Amino acid sequence: MEEVQKLEKRKKTPNKKSIEELERVVIRLAGDSGDGMQLAGLKFTSASVMLGNDVSTFPDYPAEIRAPQGTLAGVSGFQIHFSSTEIYTPGDKLDTLVAMNPAALRVNIEDLKSTGILIINQDSFTPRALSKAGYSISPLDDGTLSNFRVFPVNITKLNKEAVSSIEGISSKQINLTRNFFALGLISWLYARPLDSTIKWIEKKFSNRPAIVKANAKTLKAGYYFGETNEFLSVQYTVPKAEMKPGLYRYISGSQALALGLATASQLANRELFFGAYPITPASDLLHELVRLRGYGVKTFQAEDEIAAIGSIIGASFGGSIGVTGTSGPGLALMSEALGLAVITELPLILVNVQRAGPSTGMPTKPEQSDLLQVLFGRNGESPLPVFAPQTPGDCFKLAIKAVRIAIKYMTPVVLLSDAYLANNIDPWKIPNLSKLSPIEINNPRKSSMGSDGRFTPYTRDENLARPYVVPGTKGLEHRIGGLEKEIITGNVSYDPVNHEKMVNLREQKVSGIGKEIPSQVVEGPSKGDILVLSWGSTYGAAHTASENLRKEGFSVADTNLRFLNPLPANLGKILSSYKQILIPELNNGQLHFIIQARFSIIAESLTKVQGKPFHVEEIETVIKNIIGGIEHD
Amino acid sequence: MEEVQKLEKRKKTPNKKSIEELERVVIRLAGDSGDGMQLAGLKFTSASVMLGNDVSTFPDYPAEIRAPQGTLAGVSGFQIHFSSTEIYTPGDKLDTLVAMNPAALRVNIEDLKSTGILIINQDSFTPRALSKAGYSISPLDDGTLSNFRVFPVNITKLNKEAVSSIEGISSKQINLTRNFFALGLISWLYARPLDSTIKWIEKKFSNRPAIVKANAKTLKAGYYFGETNEFLSVQYTVPKAEMKPGLYRYISGSQALALGLATASQLANRELFFGAYPITPASDLLHELVRLRGYGVKTFQAEDEIAAIGSIIGASFGGSIGVTGTSGPGLALMSEALGLAVITELPLILVNVQRAGPSTGMPTKPEQSDLLQVLFGRNGESPLPVFAPQTPGDCFKLAIKAVRIAIKYMTPVVLLSDAYLANNIDPWKIPNLSKLSPIEINNPRKSSMGSDGRFTPYTRDENLARPYVVPGTKGLEHRIGGLEKEIITGNVSYDPVNHEKMVNLREQKVSGIGKEIPSQVVEGPSKGDILVLSWGSTYGAAHTASENLRKEGFSVADTNLRFLNPLPANLGKILSSYKQILIPELNNGQLHFIIQARFSIIAESLTKVQGKPFHVEEIETVIKNIIGGIEHD
Amino acid sequence: MTERENPLPSPVLSPKDFDSGFDVRWCPGCGDYAILANLKRVLPTLGIPKEDFVVISGIGCSSRFPYYMDTYGMHTIHGRAPTIATGLKCSRPDLSVWVVTGDGDGLSIGGNHLMHAIRRNVDIKILLFNNQIYGLTKGQYSPTTKQSKRTKSSPTGSIDYPVNPISWALGAEATFIARTIFQYPDHMQEVLRRAAEHKGVSFVEIYQNCVIFNDGAFRYATDKEMRYDNVFELEHGKPMKFGRDQEKGIFLHGLTPKVINFKQAGFDESDLLHHDENAQESTLAFFLSRMRYPEFPEPIGIFRAIQKPTYNDLLDAQMEEAKNTVTKPLQEIVNGDENWTVT
Amino acid sequence: MTERENPLPSPVLSPKDFDSGFDVRWCPGCGDYAILANLKRVLPTLGIPKEDFVVISGIGCSSRFPYYMDTYGMHTIHGRAPTIATGLKCSRPDLSVWVVTGDGDGLSIGGNHLMHAIRRNVDIKILLFNNQIYGLTKGQYSPTTKQSKRTKSSPTGSIDYPVNPISWALGAEATFIARTIFQYPDHMQEVLRRAAEHKGVSFVEIYQNCVIFNDGAFRYATDKEMRYDNVFELEHGKPMKFGRDQEKGIFLHGLTPKVINFKQAGFDESDLLHHDENAQESTLAFFLSRMRYPEFPEPIGIFRAIQKPTYNDLLDAQMEEAKNTVTKPLQEIVNGDENWTVT
Ligand SMILES: Cc1ncc(C[n+]2csc(CCOP(=O)(O)OP(=O)(O)O)c2C)c(N)n1
Ligand SMILES: Cc1ncc(C[n+]2csc(CCOP(=O)(O)OP(=O)(O)O)c2C)c(N)n1
Ligand code: SF4
Ligand code: SF4
Ligand SMILES: [Mg+2]
Ligand SMILES: [Mg+2]
């Protein structure tokens, strides 16, 4: 601890280097997947957040568990955007890149801004490592990096020097601390304090004092190296962002979803039953929820996705809040059972964390290409509500909303997240749970008894919802199932007109959820040249692009759909207020298809199907092109 | 045989009754599911077809295997429309109804035209049977049938009299021949010869002479009864239809599909591998194909639908023509594997025989509600061609076309049939197989070898198809799979730009199939007030309605889509030539959704979701309403 | 958690109380009727309130079962009943959860779920109606259909080797396994009662005759003349014998069974193999499951009944434990370990 | 039917010929490497041309296998490899079709397909890489994970009872069943060779160490000090014995195994239980499958190898028969029995 105090003092004594203030910065730490870049990135994020910056991050790790060391496939990166103004994306181009080996350099260099800072672990640029990364000549020597401000540092060596004298540290362990040296160095560069990281180290390794020492020591060594070494001549600071007052934390989409679901369970005073089968990138939801068992969250690892959704249908029938989480291939397997939930009108939540398809596709990469599947991927007319959170924090909100709607309307609800949203880490203003309104259950009413004295499970309330009656309730025994059912009694019916009525009732019930959906709000002018209509996680990039262009004086508005079915009631009116509608999405135009179908309009589609989120710039460019086109008219 | 000759003679001797010629007639034979109505209907159809009528039929049987005798649920019906002009549907309203018991009467009476002929088996109208059918008073007595020409006949008694003297006939067997008495009676009424039926009986029961005798005898007894009995005073005839010269048979959609697939297999000179799991109404395809084993059709009954499609993916990889057949719930289960076929670019055919949904729905009833599912029910961007035959005969044609396209373009193809098309029986002009052009295989070309001397399975030809190389081919060993693959080499690739290119290539390949699709042809005026745009099996009703109205002088054109993806290239132009587009379909507006999305137009939707095909009249009414609306403009 | 009313004291119930009032829609003569009648007789005797029973089925003729029982029920989708029952039982351990399935529903499309429910020892009661055919889809062969049988989908004879449901359930580590026959009412009621009382998964194979598509498949076991030679009842601790005069006995010969007319041969009952349904290891039960007609008489009754903690109990124990270790309200978990205040 | 070239005479192949040139992407130290190396050694010795091998896998670390073999191959979807292999083998009986699967891929999501492929005796070779964990999804428990194990999805210990893959395969009526261990190269090669040569389905469980998520799960069987007491090799016709000095033997005690230091106790080898891999009934194999560490030493090698016509042969026989009975061209079938001419 005295070490830290010393450090703090040092920081206060002005050093000879100049300090420059920046509005916002994007950095990326990249190395081999064994190099601990994710951890270093998280700690840098913590420190930035504690400093009061607005932050957005993007972790990016290899598909393989342990790809061969030093290969391009094994590169792991963590991007952090920190800012003194509100930000919505992890940033496009990098101000600074830290590359721990040649492979990391090769994979990431194209994202570095020209004149950007490039910190390289020079020790790792061995001939063998270079050739593994596919370099025949070292890029340090061939002039290809001349656009950047390159700082080769002997990180391996310096780290070793810092750590090797500590007692109880094996040579294998020594190299595992390199990430903290790098973190120290970059922390100095952007004037991030080390205390939160040191506290974390102390807690994490509390029973391994040598490891605590080693990590802390090399962290500081990196910091001092930046401070004392001549070649980094400028230190950058990013002032506090103005943020709404309140208690904040940072949170990933997966965490927020898990917490939202647990909160919903408490609000409904019903157990949450989470049945799932592991699949990337949805497994984290299971890992998060299993640790919330103490809060009435029951988890069940099923034998496959069909069993997962089956289990939650059973649990929902029993009165629990049935939830499952999956990704594309698993969703495909759930199609049939989801149809059963639709026709039995049981509440449940299906979280689909989208990844790049088709088929197995690119399992770790984000995409928004399951939208049409969740809407239409079932046999027969099988409508259900679909919501898509826009940010990690929104995952919490929409998780609660989904449970509320599912129970109130007796319907399955799909939440569309994606690999980006699930892993992305954003600061989040923590809600006060006691302020959230309880979720009420649709209990049976007197009117649900038929003339023969038997319970009629398909009587409907004013929302067209049927009563939620669970086994164990005396006198209300009833049977439900997948065959078409008679209006009111729920008995099996093959009557043609009854079938048509039931198809329409199910449709009307879901459309009726429109009244629960807030009016769509547009940012920017309420009429004008162009409206950027995004959905779900593309919010950040779309909004930032629009805002940037508004600042440049363009007539651009933007709005993000969090409710894909039913669509907000005022959407049609909004769409008709702009000359052009631009729909950016991480697929081949699925929302675009829906919008054209629903509103018979011609909209522009901007698609990106690269397993990567949009860059702000990509959207800006297209908007400008379109506006250019309009002005030529 | 002498009996038949006698009968023939009798027929030629003019009887005292008057004969009236009709253009077309719709009759329905209805009874308990144990009453043999399907068989009687089929035989009546045969006879009509032999007479040269155009014919269309619609069998309708209960969902239960053996519903309790005499109940409404147990009623089985067979409708026959026979005509001297071309017809396209089994007809809306009935000219004649034969009701073998009170339940059959109750279920079917609403479809009988007023003044229609109602023949009733009076013996079955016992108090017990009446009450089973939910009648408290006999409808024969309460005047409710006064709109019809009612002919109560003691069919049970008359049949017994005809048959009981035959040696070797048990009392149980006696009652089983009643359907032939009824068939005889109605055959007289519409002047159908009995010879084809008698021949069939002789063949069918060749080793049970007593049964042959009994059936033949009661058949004739029924005929003579009609002829001699006073109360049926008019005999109706329907002259031959003018049909294209050629060899004809009658055929159901299931049969035609099976024969088309077997023919395609011969054209491609590849074994057909049919892997399926039984499901109503698709099981018949398995039953038909298993009998074609002698023609190189291998069938495999899998443990479920996932295994079924898996097996055909394996068989296709091996070089066979992989085909599966299923219905809604099974299709849902196949979603994931279908995506694998898309990304591995293997040819296969999935026949989806649509039934009423959602979930288990009404398994025996037709619906067109899986269109969006086959287009979009897979994770990721997963395009594939979708064809929908319009008639049983068209099933044969499109089965061959599907195989041709699948192999030429290396893609799975979906054929959308439905419960109506599968069971519906139409006369069919039999094609000459030797006139069909062979199906060629996309063999590997020199250009498919990479620079490292390894085969590159994702090289593409001018159609963007990859070569079809099967295991066992020396030197072309390669691996395929569900992960995104590198352009050309097919190696696993996580490269963002490669992914986007592959997504687009798959899309373009499927769009490119457009050039294989005939230009959409419109019947009626090439521009005008209204275009009726139907798809698949709604062809008959939509076309008949339009034609009827054209005859009445309305400006109505009609066209039927057999190719749902890609859509015919000239469709956009056609759509723009009419003031209104009306899209009738047996779902809640799925093609309507697609058309609006693709062409940004406003179209009218006519939906029917009753598990029943359209009546011509239903479409006529809507067309007239719309035209009325247009004229008010 | 739920709007349960106080379940005690439960009124005395009769089979009629379990009548749902629906028209039963099986074919006349279908073996399913007998099973329905017997279960309706057993349920009222269990001391469980009617509203605590739930019957979950898949798809098939047999799976129409829930509609005919005035309990809670769900007629779900093909092969998935065990998954729904598992979720229900885990979330509501207070309920008595029954699964009704067929040889197609349970062993063809649903084999995996059945196996996993069995393996986990979820406390559900599984009744497999085995008619060795797909009834509802009108007569294709099933995974239990005898090889060479001609059916709709195998006009020249099925080439599938049938699975042995009892051996299969043993391979899946079932804690309770029994077999009974649709025409053995007393036996069936006893087996159903025991299945109900077993704490853990109960797997009961019921031979059931499909009169339409596979009539007579079990005649060897139901025919008055034939049954004595082809079927024997397992009784815990008792010697295994059969025949019209109980004159034939089963002997253990290494690891294979031998049938000997032990009375004639001068053996004593005590020389016969004795049944031990509680044997911890499943080898005896497996051995018994291999005895199939026509080579051997077929054992019916309880092959195995052992105690292992149920999945749902283990799950609840972990839930309890977790709840007991909770020290802070959910709000604090939501707040997280690292947070900061913006003022 | 296909564009096969004349497959004979096949050149002499070496393991290197099976190298696909892809970078192998398993974690350093993963047990999968050893299996890959051993299979590459066995395939060239089988006298089968390289182009006639096909390796089909599902999804999982293990399922990346086909990419590393220069044969035909397909990396399919999770759990479905047996279905694809079945279709392939039935349509192309001339090929040597291998399935590579994991404990999750094969026994969790894919259990049903595996069971049905086994039951049907399709002539495919199934290798189940059992590391008792889900590797690819980063460490959740699998159906073979030991109870109480803490994993990502069971932080306080798994409550699932594991399945015994050998017992399970016996319940599915496998005709060839074997077990081997990733660190027993010679044994594995012998087992793989026998599996390849078996006509019918071959089911081989391979213990495989996941260094990242379940390291040491099989230490009892691979550790130099421990293996002698914990593992014994089954040899057809030979007595079952083990121990550093082969001093311990297996005795049959009714239907349960007994382990006795038979040398000390004065028994002769001939008193020991002898292995019979060809036993028609599967009871012996089942009995052996129940011997699990730590209560018993675990048998490895071939549990069972019996002959039954394969599914694909039966299918081809029916096809042949059908073709032989064909008397008229397809055109006549298309024409139908009842037709008429319009002129
Ligand atoms: C996903 C799906 N596939 C297929 C079917 C069709 N199907 C319904 S029941 C059944 C088999 C029934 O056999 P079994 O379980 O033995 O029941 P049984 O009718 O003999 O009682 C099949 C194949 C279906 N309903 N759903
Ligand atoms: C339909 C589907 N569900 C889930 C997954 C995710 N998944 C991939 S591999 C796997 C389990 C792998 O375990 P195992 O078969 O034991 O293979 P290992 O990695 O241990 O070799 C899972 C759950 C998937 N790819 N597809
Ligand atoms: S088809 Fe068979 S199983 Fe189904 S109801 Fe009829 S007799 Fe019973
Ligand atoms: S995670 Fe385990 S099984 Fe997968 S490659 Fe790594 S060590 Fe092997
Ligand atoms: Mg059955
Ligand atoms: Mg594993």
Image (cartoon, coloured by chain):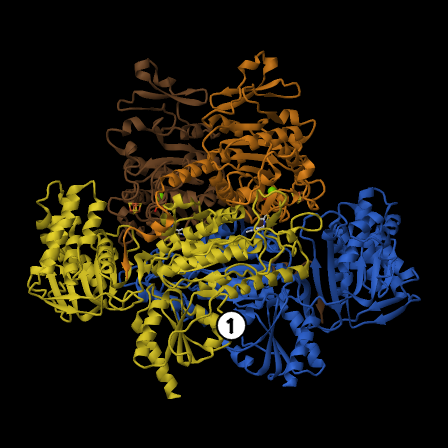
Chain colours: A blue, B yellow, C brown, D orange
Q: Secondary structure at mark 1?
A: helix
Query: C26 or B272, which lies in front?
Result: B272
Q: Tell me the crowding category of disc 1: few under 14, some 14 to 19, or many 20 or more residues within 10 angstroms, Cα based.
A: some
**Chain letter belonging to callout 1:** B
Residue D260, image x and y in percent?
57, 18
Q: Position of residue A36 (x, y in %)?
A: 75, 52
Which quadrant of the structure image shows residue A115?
Answer: bottom right
Looking at the image, residue B499 lies above or below residue C240: below
* Residue B50 figure quarter: bottom left
Counting from the top left corner in percent of width and height, residue B345 is at: 56, 54
Viewer-proximal residue among B381 and A254: B381
Mark 1 — residue? B598
At x 45%, y 59%, the residue is B401
Percent across and percent down for residue A209 are 79, 46
**At label 1, which amino acid type do we have?**
Arg
Near-viewer residue (B38 or C90): B38
Residue B306 lies, with reference to residue B428, above or below; the image says: above
Name the residue furthest front. D343
Q: Quadrant of residue B25?
A: bottom left
Assign the C terminus of chain D to one quadrant of the image: bottom left
